[in-house]
């Protein structure tokens, strides 16, 4: 006989949400592992003392984590999920008959907090990872990925026309949105730095305020920067939907608007993300690298011994800065020395560091002459009479004044890094990079919505990326929490290469020992207001 189910719901009595959520529910584990009470201190300055009570900041950040774990793309959808999922209600601390916050409150709260609070939230999660022993610190991996913006390429207009249009639009509506992005939010570090011994040093404060890095300006491009005479597309065109997103080339000649997301990942087994930044896609990968590195090193007081990145990070500036600080730069160096131009390239000449001269393929010497006009290197020239009488001249130079070569000032560092190539540790580090950082981006894109940002403008996409990276670190805490990585095994797998013998006077020695940051460090004030000598001391 076919049964018929009658729909009848009687009021529930003596039933608690605590009983309805199973003991092994994921959100129970998350709640037990992660104490979010610290967020109240982070946002204390964003609220007035009097007035109507706001949504609890802990509830806001719990909702952000639910959004991350459930891969939800909007606040409205998030609140729909929260309304009909018992476990989410339990995680938020709302009983069955309690009304949940309205979805529109979440956008307002996010705007009120600003990116600084989200960065501090991310950093607090990293601190948890340090305390759980999940960060190794000796090896850092750099990588970036392109992320689509929430804007179509058809929204591109001439930059000057679009800027005028946006200005008029915001003037008409009276919106403060444009100004809001330029108004610095109160940094939670401001209070912490007041307790430092040099907090009263006004000149230091002024110099710190003047200095600007990629992180402090939230990844914003400098429109005055130019790497050549050619104008960038983003200098001419601007999206009216998301003015910070810039055109980027994807596979098969497809152009989209987007951003570039950068991760600095620890080399320990847990693969903790130590730093995150989003810039417009027009920014080349190598430019924010040093800012991200120094910020990670000083913030976490780690003594990294090597940094690994792909060839896009292997610029002379980056390589020289790393090697000068005693950090091995495991980056692929672009090799243009043997380019087929019809003439001998620099690779055909041998440099003698003792005598500071080059030896050409015909065994003639190229002596040091002068610095280049842009003061970026040194000029070396062979004698005109030797070249004009040389059998190889047709393959070497067209000049009647003798063959000339340029040597960049940082070439010594390039030579040293070229010496790493082929060593066990270098090859291992480059192989490790592929399975260390790239899967993190794949995870963020496939499961946590990083394939396309849902928010618009640079500040908001930075918040989004910081939350995704925080969520990924929370996953590591859940998976590895309490277990320390097998440091000895990792160190053995990444044995240092034998010394290349390439000594450079102005660079530090590579470090051979490492001290673990203590737990007490995280109870100290923020380490940003530090004088130059102290910064240098920290690197030793
Ligand atoms: S042309 Fe001059 S620099 Fe070139 S191989 Fe001959 S001697 Fe050497």
Image (spheres, rainbow, N blue to C red):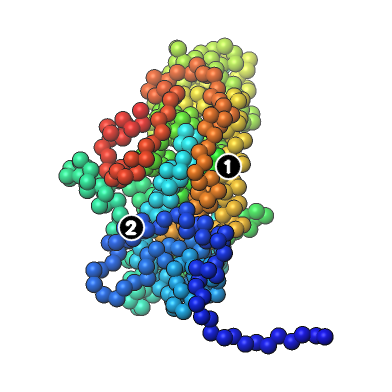
Q: Which mark is residue 470?
A: none
Separation of residues labelled 2 and 1 (CA atoms): 31 Å
Q: Is residue 484 above or below residue 451?
A: above
Tag in front: 2 or 1: 2
Sooner in the amino-acid sequence: mark 2 or mark 1: 2
* Tag 1 secondary structure: helix
- Residue 532 visible, this orientation: yes
Looking at the picture, how far across and down is residue 377, in whole percent? 42, 28
Task: Please name whichever residue, 452 or 76, is drawn nearer the observer in this view of the structure.
Answer: 76
Q: Which mark is residue 42?
A: 2
Picture quarter with the N terminus = bottom right
Q: Is residue 32 above or below residue 86?
A: above
At a point 30% along the width and 54% down the height, the residue shown is: 188
Relative placement, left or right, of 520 versus 275 is: left
Outermost residue on the right side: it is: 1
Picture quarter with the C terminus = top left
Looking at the picture, how far across and down is residue 132, in whole percent? 46, 43
Looking at the picture, how far across and down is residue 284, in whole percent? 49, 47
Q: Is residue 459 above or below residue 506?
A: below
At a point 36% along the width and 78% down the height, the residue shown is: 173
Q: Does the numbered disc 1 mark a residue whose Cβ is under 8 Å from ligand 1?
A: no
Instruction: Name the quadrant containing residue 174.
Output: bottom left
At a point 48% along the width and 36% down the height, the residue shown is: 136
Name the residue tied to disc 1.
436
Looking at the picture, how far across and down is residue 490, in whole percent? 56, 32
Outermost residue on the front side: it is: 14
* Tag 2 secondary structure: helix
């Amino acid at each position: 006989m076919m049964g018929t189910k009658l729909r009848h719901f009687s009021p529930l009595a003596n039933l608690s949400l605590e009983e309805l959520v199973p003991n092994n529910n994921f959100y129970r584990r998350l709640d037990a592992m992660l104490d979010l009470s610290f967020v109240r201190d982070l946002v204390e300055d964003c609220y007035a003392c009097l007035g109507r009570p706001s949504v609890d900041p802990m509830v806001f950040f719990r909702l952000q984590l639910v959004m991350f774990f459930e891969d939800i793309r909007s606040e409205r959808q998030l609140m729909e999920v929260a309304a009909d999922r018992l476990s989410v209600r339990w995680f938020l601390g709302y009983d069955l008959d309690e009304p949940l916050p309205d979805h529109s409150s979440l956008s307002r709260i996010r705007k009120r907090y600003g990116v600084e609070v989200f960065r501090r939230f991310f950093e607090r999660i990293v601190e948890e990872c340090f305390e759980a022993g999940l960060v190794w610190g000796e090896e850092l991996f750099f990588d970036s990925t392109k992320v689509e913006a929430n804007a179509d390429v058809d929204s591109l207009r001439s930059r000057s026309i679009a800027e005028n249009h946006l200005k008029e639009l915001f003037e008409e509506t009276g919106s403060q949105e444009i100004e809001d992005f330029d108004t610095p939010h109160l940094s939670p570090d401001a209070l912490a730095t007041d307790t430092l011994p040099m907090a009263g040093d006004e000149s230091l404060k002024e110099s710190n305020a003047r200095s600007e890095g990629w992180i402090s300006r939230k990844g914003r491009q400098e429109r005055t920067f130019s790497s050549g005479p050619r104008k960038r597309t983003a200098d001419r065109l601007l999206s009216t939907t998301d003015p910070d997103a810039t055109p980027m080339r994807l596979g098969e000649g497809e152009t989209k608007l987007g951003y570039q997301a950068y991760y600095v990942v620890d080399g320990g087994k847990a693969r903790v993300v130590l730093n995150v930044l989003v810039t417009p896609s027009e920014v080349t990968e190598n430019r924010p690298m040093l800012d991200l590195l120094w910020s990670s090193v000083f913030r976490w007081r780690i003594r990294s011994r090597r940094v690994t990145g792909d060839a896009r990070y292997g610029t002379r500036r980056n390589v020289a800065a790393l090697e000068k600080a005693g950090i091995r730069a495991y980056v692929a160096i672009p090799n243009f020395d043997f380019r087929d131009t019809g003439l001998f390239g620099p690779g055909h000449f041998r440099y003698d560091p003792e005598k500071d001269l080059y030896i050409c393929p015909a065994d003639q010497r190229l002596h040091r002459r002068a610095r280049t006009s842009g003061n970026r290197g040194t000029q070396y020239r062979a004698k005109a009479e030797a070249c004009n009488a040389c059998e190889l001249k047709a393959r070497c130079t067209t000049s009647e004044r003798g063959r000339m070569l340029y040597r960049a000032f940082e070439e010594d560092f390039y030579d040293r890094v070229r010496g790493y190539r082929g060593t066990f540790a270098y090859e291992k580090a480059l192989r490790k990079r592929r399975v260390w950082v790239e899967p993190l981006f794949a995870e963020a894109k496939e499961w946590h919505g990083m394939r396309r940002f849902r928010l618009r403008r640079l500040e908001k996409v930075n918040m989004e990326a910081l939350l995704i990276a925080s969520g990924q670190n929370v996953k590591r805490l859940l998976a590895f929490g309490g277990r320390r990585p097998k440091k000895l095994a990792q160190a053995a797998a990444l044995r240092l290469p034998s010394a290349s013998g390439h000594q450079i006077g102005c660079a530090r020695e590579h470090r051979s020992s490492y001290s673990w940051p203590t737990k007490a460090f995280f109870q100290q004030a923020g380490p940003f207001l530090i004088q130059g000598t102290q910064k240098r001391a920290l690197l030793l």
